[in-house]
Amino acid sequence: MLAAIQEAFGKECLPINLPAGGAKRVVDCFFNPSGDADFSSVEQAHRALVDQVVEVDEELMSVYLEKGEVAPEELHAPFEKALREGHLVPVCFVSARNGVGLTELLDVFVKLLPNPAEGNPPLFYKGDGERATEFRSQPDPKKHVLAHIFKVVNDPYVGKLGIFRVHQGTITKDTQLYVGDARKPFKVGHLFVLQGKDHTEVNEAVPGDIAAVAKIDEIEFDCVMHDSHDEDEIHMRPLEFPTPMYGLAIEPKKRGDEQRISDAIHKITAEDPTFRMDHDATTHETVIRGLGDLHVRSVLERMNTQYKVEVNTRPPRIPFRETITARAEGHARHKKQTGGAGQFGEVYLRVEPLARGTGFEFEDAVRGGVIPNQFIPAVEKGIEQVLASGAIAGYPMQDLRVTVYDGKHHQVDSKEVAFVSAGRKAFLDALEKARPIILEPIVNVEIICPEANMGDITGDISGKRGQITGTNSLSPGTVTISGRVPLSELNGYANRLKSVTGGQGSYSMELSHYEAVPPNVQAQLVTEYKASRKQAEED
């Protein structure tokens, strides 16, 4: 088993003790390395431990090389440093069935592991941005209060519950506390310690204690509570969490449940830093994201059971875009006569493609007042209507310039509505000649996976029209694969990666740029759009 641990996690995993007497006891390999073990050698294990520990302390290494031995008491500080740097991962043998090795494990905690004042003290920082400086708390009950909210629970009976650890100072009932940079304090009415579902009220919490306060709306996950304005700018270093990648678009099953669903999701996101909700303005979808299918499904189940709201789900739509690939000109005349005052507007314009990521540009090149200045915004409004709905597949348009250069107006019949219509029709006329195409989002993806699965992952990415841009070894047996992949090819990728890597892989992505889709994909999207429009007209 020890060999399997070292193979999986590295040679830094070294035994502090070894089983002996047929696994009926354990023998110490650190303080008193004598006796026989069921496997391996106690002396050899002791030597490996000392060799590993002294490597982090040059002074101690010199003494060790000169004398050939170091007293165990001298190894406490470098042992703690080796733990902090990941240079040593101690392995202790314990039996949960008969308790063998349990006492020895507690001795290891007391004698070797860092106490709360050592090791990695909670690192705060003071100030923001470039002027932020490190600030370390002191476990002194007489100093100003510093407490870190590491968990938020929305209890249906108690209300919002903020669970925190006290790092400095003493919190009692009636203590006035501030949350982060807030200027208004709140009063601690009830102070709890938690054990399972039981909330026991206590009088005080001192450094090292884990306690909770209830019904404080200002409390948020990862915030700092304090009792002095001098501590206003002290923050905890943000905790690192995996990026939620798996997403589902949701909509209410019942009309009118939108607000209840929003309230439920906001309460859940307040508790869970790896769950989030986004509203995509392009696709007009509300998308919830988590670490995987099981995570998202458990949230949906909780919304149903605890908050009594149900939603329909589907994969999120891909935010495609449209653009043009050639210059073209368009013309339209809007003329309407109804017996009274009529409508008249005529517009000439041209379109031209711009570089990717440029967006949209509108240029007024009208001369001689053929289109009065007050009607130019109306022409632009008509063009923007087409930009929002697209030319061939219903997706927003980008990366093009529209120049209005000529037109006509009527002294009596010209109105804003006429030039809106003429601008829209002229733009559509030009787009038909400008060879419009559909663009798809390309994302930078970074995948962390076991080295054994590297070939499967790179092959899978290539099969998804992706491109591998680099690989890097993180640790023995683990690699990072970087690449660029069309976002449309990554639907359901979390489950695929889980299957390939046996649950050991993870990935993150960010938008890189937009590229033209292959012709077959464009033909499919255009066909689907036309079919949906036809169905909508029939309905």
Image (tube, rainbow, N blue to C red):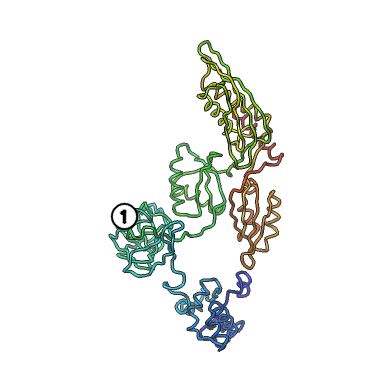
Q: Residue furthest left?
A: 174
* Left or right, 445 with reference to 519: left
Per the image, the residue denoted by label 1 is: 185
- Residues 235 and 305: in front is 235
Question: Quarter holding the C terminus?
Answer: top right
Disc 1 residue type (three-letter): Pro
**Residue 411: x, y in percent?**
52, 15
Q: Is residue 25 visible?
A: no
**Could you tell me which residue is drawn at 61 percent across and 61 percent down?**
504
Q: Determine the residue positioned at 70% across, 59% down.
A: 455
Residue 398 lies, in percent from the top left, at 60, 37
Task: Judge whether 65 appears above or below 505 on screen.
Answer: below
Q: Quadrant of residue 208?
A: bottom left
Q: Residues within 10 Å of mark 1 (few under 14, many from 20)?
A: some
Q: Is 436 above or below relative to 89?
A: above
Furthest residue in direction front, as rendered: 368
Q: How many marks?
A: 1
